Image (tube, coloured by chain):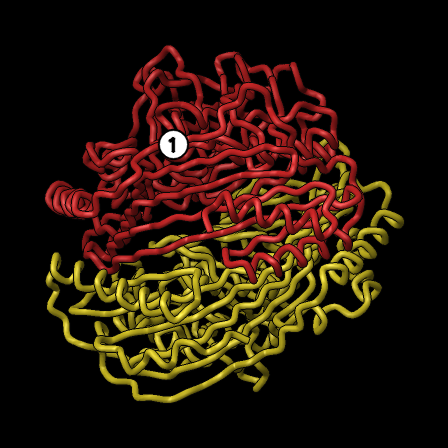
Amino acid sequence: MIQDRISQFKRDFSSHTELRAQVNTTRRIGFLGGNLVTNLRSEQGGVSARVYEGGVYGFSSSADYTEDSIRAVLKAAQENARFLDSRVRKGKGPFPVIGAGNRNLDLEFRDAEQKRYIDFAKEVDAYIAGKYPNLASRSIILRSECTEKLLVVSDGFDSHSRLPRTHMYVILTANTPEGSTVELVCMFGDSGDFESNFTAPEQLFPEIDRTYEELMKKAEGIYADAGLKDCVLHPNLAGILAHEAVGHTVEADLVLGGSVASHCLNRQVASELVTMIDFAHTLPDGSPAPLPVLVDDEGTPAEDAVLIENGILKGYMNNRESAQHFGVKPQGNARGYLFSDEPLIRMRNTGILPGKDKLEDMIAAIDDGYYLTETNNGQADTTGEFMFGVCMGYEIKHGKLGRAIRDTTISGVAFDMLKTVDMLSDTCVWSCNGTCGKKQPMAVGMGGPAVKCRVTIGGR
Amino acid sequence: MENREIAQYALEALKKAGADEAQCIVSRGKTDELNVDGGEFSLMRSLLNSSISLKVLKDHRKGVVSINKLDRESIDKAVADCIAAAESSMPDEAEVIAEISENADTNFISGALEPDKDRLFDRIQEFLTVVKKEYPKVIMEQLISEYSHTDMLYMNTNGVEFSYKAGGYGFSTMFSAHEGEKASSFIGYGANLNTLDEPFLEIGQQKILLEESGKQLSARPVDGKFVGTLVITPACLGEILSTIVGNFMSDSVIIDKTSPWIEKLGERVADERFTLSTIPLDDRIVCGERFTGEGYPSQNETLIENGILKSFKLSAYGSRKTGYARALNSSWNMEVQPGDTSLEEILSGIDKGLILNRFSGGQPGTNGDFSGVAKNSFLIENGKMTDAVSETMISGNLADILLHIRGISKERLCDGASVLPWIAFDGVTISGK
């Protein structure tokens, strides 16, 4: 646990100040065709301070975590704030007071020996090599991360948090009849450390077998027919839909930059079936969110941010500065990735609430379209135009699944596409393997149900 | 302790702990950064950076540990961790620590070693003022500009030692145009700089992209679907070329033989006018790589010459694993040789196609198939750039398009990281609504 060397400096804060000590721990194993190509242990830690004066921030960080370096970063952050304030003179006043408190989130992180990761991944690799010798290639990436933060603030909640997540990616590549290759990835893991996610390699084998079967179908698959199509997005895609298509456009910093959502507050932006929430720490069924946040890096106690309610855009995600601008209460969305990163407005656990439909009924309702089941990346635009890569899917013909399709991309304009949503499944899938990119990377949770909608699909 | 003293201490400790061979990279630096959000200064940030990376081989088993603390206690722990990681690993004869290269320079200095913070602030302010005046519809959603200085040392147990002091400026912008409720897609552009002598507006493609942003307010989807010509601008070409190199020429796809170019060394993989090099030592590249992370001196290298594949882009490990030559650098500073026709001439010969400034797409598989959204892009009709497009997708295959180059412009742009022309590729599927 990070030793508390920062609380003693709280009495010296003169302006709005956040002081944070942090350590990011990473363990990573990579196998490629049976070769151990990555065998890495990494720790990045240090202390940072951010000071607000007159409408601008000063920030400073140091990898050294000593009383002298803490004093130095506080001084440098103050000087930076004063320098910038002296040059731009925005003349803004202090933030509304939050009040003092303390909340801790200490999830367990047992730092397994590197041998544990290697032996586990090696056993999984041996299973694949033995059972599927016809694969063109196989690789495994096993990654365990833990972010530990200790925060004291001049106004708001102090906190200590420890948030681990561990995932394994199994990437299978097969030859196609025409002599090229196709790939498919299966992912295991969740929040928590290695030991709490992975106990026996054989527990993974059924899912690897299923992925192999799908890969064989994909190798024989066809290219999607490009154009606007009726589609069912598997729950695996709902999270990225929530995150990319809507989430980024309702981050208040992007709203202030002119995102499409800046004109849409309290307007109908989606079908009445759609309710979208950025959950702070607890899902509607009372279970913990994939990556819970109790207090953000500005000392704001975290609560859920309702983004879309029954199709109406209800609000944005804010930090303290944007919340003051919009005259709303901040809800704890400001987070920094490393100790040396300033807090930015970030999503936490963003998802669409489930509906009442059955997945099989949703597929049966499509005469000519696609059922899209796996995604590998996504990007957003401030216009609301989004895209994400689809790496597994099937044709739907006359309400039944047909041939598998090759890699493709779907895209649309979020607030147009969401109005076409006419069915949502009654079950959700949540995940926390996503790393969002926005100046800094950030671990994010996302989830939702299967979605029936009309979306543009790329193809040939 | 100084960097050299730290590296010596770490290597001695690794040897004492049982390492057969080891390498150590120690780095210290400082970053001063100014941020603009929504067109206004928002943050000034100063970072003191440090890192040490240890790689050890024990019985041909590799362990790697990376930390950012340089005190003795932290290094001692990292040494123990690194040895434990190696002992847990699997033997691999392809893992090596670099031997001394004959006649190689070992000490390097590059760029601006001291920042001029006031001038940096003034350059940003000047840029914001000009954008506000000349491009009133543009909102500068974010601008980040910084000065970074790094003092790095590489040392290994075979006597290889390099040091590199480098400093430079950088700026990156993200902006979009707005008129009432109409908005263009955002676009980002950035560059690395040795000096602050030139206004940011005049660097690389920055000005063109700002001018085009306003025209994108009236973007519309392409009608239907057609196969046409894709003209990729320098702002977008670097990313596409990086994907091509990664997918067809890098360690993973050559080691597992999934690259479609695995049998193509010495053969044609692109149009004969296409020559691609990596040029970290070029004067136009800001603070380019001088030695690789594996301990070899960097040299510029031509990967594809007149369409012929000359080399894969392999690490020393990848080289020993496959028997192909090691790449002469590990940088991504790319140069494409210019063509002999102007951009205007190339465009005038295109019946129907797109000018692509940004690609938002799924990660292409090893086979090179790509599909995604054409962002900040314009239709080409009957030899002229016409309407801006939205909700328009493109798809094709990266290996195929290299063989179907219509033209390479004689104009090129440099952003301090690469030197690239406009390239027109035929045979790309373009689809709208």
Residue A263 position within the rendered picture, expressed as x and y whole percent measured from the top left? 26, 64
- Quarter of the image where the N terminus of chain A is located: bottom right
Which of B34/B139 is in front? Answer: B34
The chain painted red is B
Residue A313 position within the rendered picture, expressed as x and y whole percent measured from the top left? 35, 72
In the image, taking residue A110 as reference, residue B280 lies left or right, namely left
Which of B415/A108 is in front? Answer: A108
Three-letter amino acid code at the position of disc 1 = Ile
Q: Is residue B151 visible?
A: yes
Badge 1 element: strand
Quarter of the image for residue B215 reads top left
Residue, x 61% and y 33% (percent of image)?
B159
Q: Is residue A185 visible?
A: no
- Answer few, some or many: residues within 10 Å of disc 1's Cα (few below 14, many 20 plus, some between 14 and 19): some
In the image, taking residue B365 as reference, residue A320 lies left or right, namely left
The chain painted yellow is A
Residue A266 position within the rendered picture, expressed as x and y whole percent measured from the top left? 30, 74
Quarter of the image for residue B353 reads top left
Residue, x 77% and y 53% (percent of image)?
B87
Q: Which residue is tagged 1?
A: B109
- Quarter of the image where the C terminus of chain A is located: top right
Relative to B59, residue B275 above or below: above
Residue, x 21% and y 47% (percent of image)?
B117
The image shows a total of numbered marks equal to 1
Relative to A124, residue B199 above or below: above
